[in-house]
Amino acid sequence: MIFQPAILALILAAVLSLAMLTGAFPFAVQVIRHWDVTSGSERQLMLERRTYLFSTLVAFVCLLQLFSTLLYVFTADKLAVMFVGAMCAVGSLNVNPFGFPTLYLQLSIFFLAAIWLVLNHADNQARDYPLVRIKYAYLIALWPFLAANLWLMLSYFLALKADVITSCCGSLFSEGSSALAAEISTLAPLPAMAIFFGGLLFAIGAAFWHWRLGGDFSGYLTTVGAASGFAAALIGILSFLSLYIYEHPHHHCPFCILQPEYGYLGYALYLPLFAATASGLAVGVLRLFSRRPSLISIIARLSARLAGFTAIVFLLFAVLSSLIVLRSRLYLFS
Amino acid sequence: MRTWIEKQLYLIDFALASLARKKAKHFGLLLLFAALVFVLASVSLYTHALRRETQSLLAASPEIVLQRLVAGRHDLIPPGYLERLGTIRGVQKIQPRLWGYYYDAVVKANYTFMVAPDMAIARGEIVVGPALMRARGLAPGNGVSFRSYTGELFTFIVGDVLPQASELVSADLVLMHEADFRAFFKYPEGHYTDVALSIANPQEVKNVAKKLLNQLPDSRPILREEVLRTYASLFDWREGLMLALLSAAILAFVIFAWDKAAGLSAEERREIGILKAIGWETGEVLSMKSWEAILIALAAFLVGYLAAYLHVFHQHAFLFEPVLKGWAVLYPRFALPPHIDGLQIATLFFFTVVPYVAATLVPIWRAATIDPDAAMRL
Amino acid sequence: MIELSGIRKVFNQGRHNEFCALSSIDLTIPAQRITVLKGPSGSGKTTLLTILGLLARPTEGRVKLLGEAVSGLPERFLTEIRRKTFGFVFQQFHLLRGLSALENVILPAYPLGLPRRELLAKGEALLARLRLDQRRNARIEWLSGGEQQRVAICRALINDPQVLIADEPTANLDTRLAKEFLAILESLAEEKRTIVLTSHDPLIVESSLCDRIVSMRDGRIIEIYDRR
């Protein structure tokens, strides 16, 4: 293991998230078994009070995940100097098979927690709290994700070994270690562009449709659209957007754009992308409960607003990406 | 949305007023928190600055340094050795170097004697590093004597002093003319200490090193990249170790914060009861108390970080210098170039603010869920 | 305005110190009238007031507000309804020390997120109405008992509630101030507000202002007397 402060911080965050959810576990079981909103009994009052704590905890975990995802990428980027052949975060994440899965899992937990928060928000507006059991079952289902996250992260960091000079001044220039896959396999720019703009258009269209007209079908479609928009955006960043940003025809790294050399452009791309995807995903999940009597008007309003947000932010993302392509001094097509 | 923002502003307003009303209680916490941030940030800023300093120095060093080994030990490069190399593609320049160590019994310190190939130094003159200058009380034009390993006394005139900027490596440096060097150490003519190779294309470095090994099997090429990596992990390790040691302090602070947040005074309990009775909802009290915690955490972080910045970059990190720099007799006294790094701030944040907020969540919630009818029963 | 039926309130349920504060309460609070709950201390007046004012949920029974059942609602919604409908004046006033009179008055409106200028104007108007405009920036602990009560009344009125609830409003006042309070009460009644008080002060109970007097003992209602 490489003994590095940022690594310790990440492990601390993962442990903290898991500990919080573990603490919530027995309570979640209690809610599922004993919840009765019409009762004025002291147990019910206690359960209601506890729900405030757990929605705060999940919000905290959600934020923590978002920040630790960013910190994770940064750390990987900084670690690149430790490994022969690693130029940036991609290289260090490829050092062992746990690097990328940890990243994916971190992102999934962020999305899952965000969806929970949306459900919670809707539920808290309905006077009979109709989703309370579902919410707490969801919370229990989230636990394995956080446990797996901690396990993967530990596996990744514990297996890291810097290629350093070992004996006193002894040179071992690491001939044995195979070159790392420093780049991610990518698509050719033209088909990638088609997928990128196609996916985004689908996401924007579905979300716009739901925003203006509502309905369950368009809601589910918004979720599918957000997922495909997210995938398309990642493909686009890997295959051609990164090239235009670096103005280099072969550098495909999705992480270097977060660096100051590129004006922190990565944040302007990723943060809206994550926000739009999370809200788009939540729309369809909300629509699953659109027929609960106390939720009809609440969900109709909330899912439309989320879809509107999704459509606008995806649109901004598409505009920003197009601007990057247009303003770049790199020409992939003559 | 506007109502929401307006509401949060009211809550922040109230949180600030309530912090101001209970100065005594929060001041101690703030001070302790800031002290914790100060210590952690000092360690972090200091090691980061050192790391950057070595990196920028190494950036100017040759891509490969070639040494010769005899029986696994570093040995001199004999005459004719370099000719065996022939031409290797990609190598811009091959520069044999002469350097050695000298123990000065007067100040009980080791110096590095070196021949500077690209610096014109007259015979009998030397150029010294700033630390040595301070230790021996030298000034340009002074004479200084060294007793060589053979017992002979050599006297040199100090021609110049190296600039302060790169003091970390040049502190103990003595630069001299080649003939003086060979005479002082009785260094055999035509022999060299090692060879520096400059290579233009960084991608070629590994290939060149391989070829060197093929043609000169008794040689040992040291790559700059490897040295960088070794230094980086060394500094990381030191910083990580410091943090691990300090984690006990973080834990103690977290327990203190928990205790402080959990131990509501009767007055605070009464206030929250009143707020709830006059129409504040649990979630709103929770937000208000969270704002309180966030404001404290941010203020402490800011104060602690600022103090650490001043400590490291303006006061030469006088508190930690001996621990972090190592134990050389000739301390380099250098002002580290100020540098702030986003990753470093984020890491510090994770180590201080996150545990604090996490520790106060449960006590805050407990305070916020006081029954609204409690005020009636007071 | 408010209908209570079959109300029972038990504290420390299931524990050895279980205590039944109210049982089988059926009561209607008429709109735009002044209702007084009277009875010796420990008779359950204050507990009943907390249930009427939606500060607490009954263990059993139903509470209807303007025909809508509210007793089964979670605290979040109860609070929402309560802060729009009720204003409270507590026996000990319960003002926050260290804040000014004006700050205390506008405190209940913070969660509503009104524009600041509008809120301040509202608070100042209320203070002026109860002749406190000179004292609006004075810290609460510098005010006299009577002034403090008037600040507490202003605070209760800041969200323009339909119902004003006051617990033993004259317990801490001398006769002159108690009469002053009655005058304020009268002016509020003229604004068609519903008022519920607890009191055993003859000055209030025997006042002609009160429309309905509910006598309580040991957690039960023993008599309801309508003056008109």
Image (tube, rainbow, N blue to C red):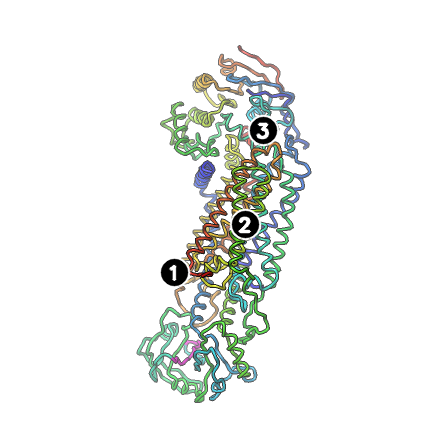
Residue of label 3: C56
Above or below: residue B105 compared with residue B78 = above
User: Viewer-nearest of labels 3 and 2?
Assistant: 2
**CA neighbours of label 1 inside 10 A, class few (<14), some (14 to 19), many (20+):** some
Cα distance between the residues tagged 1 and 2 = 50 Å
Task: Kindly identify which numbered label has been placed on residue A229.
Answer: 2
**CA neighbours of label 3 inside 10 A, class few (<14), some (14 to 19), many (20+):** many
Say which amino acid is labelled 1.
His
SS class, disc 2: helix
**CA neighbours of label 2 inside 10 A, class few (<14), some (14 to 19), many (20+):** many
Residue numbers of the magenta segment? B107-117
Q: In the rendered structure, the residue with mark 1 lies on which chain?
A: B
Q: Are marks 1 and 3 on the same chain?
A: no
SS class, disc 1: helix
Residue A228 visible in the current orientation: yes
**Does the magenta run of residues contain B110?**
yes
Q: In the rendered structure, the residue with mark 2 lies on which chain?
A: A
Q: Nearer the viewer, residue B183 or A88?
A: A88
Above or below: residue B183 compared with residue A111 = below
Residue of label 1: B314
Q: In the rendered structure, the residue with mark 3 lies on which chain?
A: C
Q: Residue at x 53, y 56 (%)?
A: A192
Cα distance between the residues tagged 3 and 2 = 49 Å
Where is residue B272 shown, x and y percent of the image?
51, 35
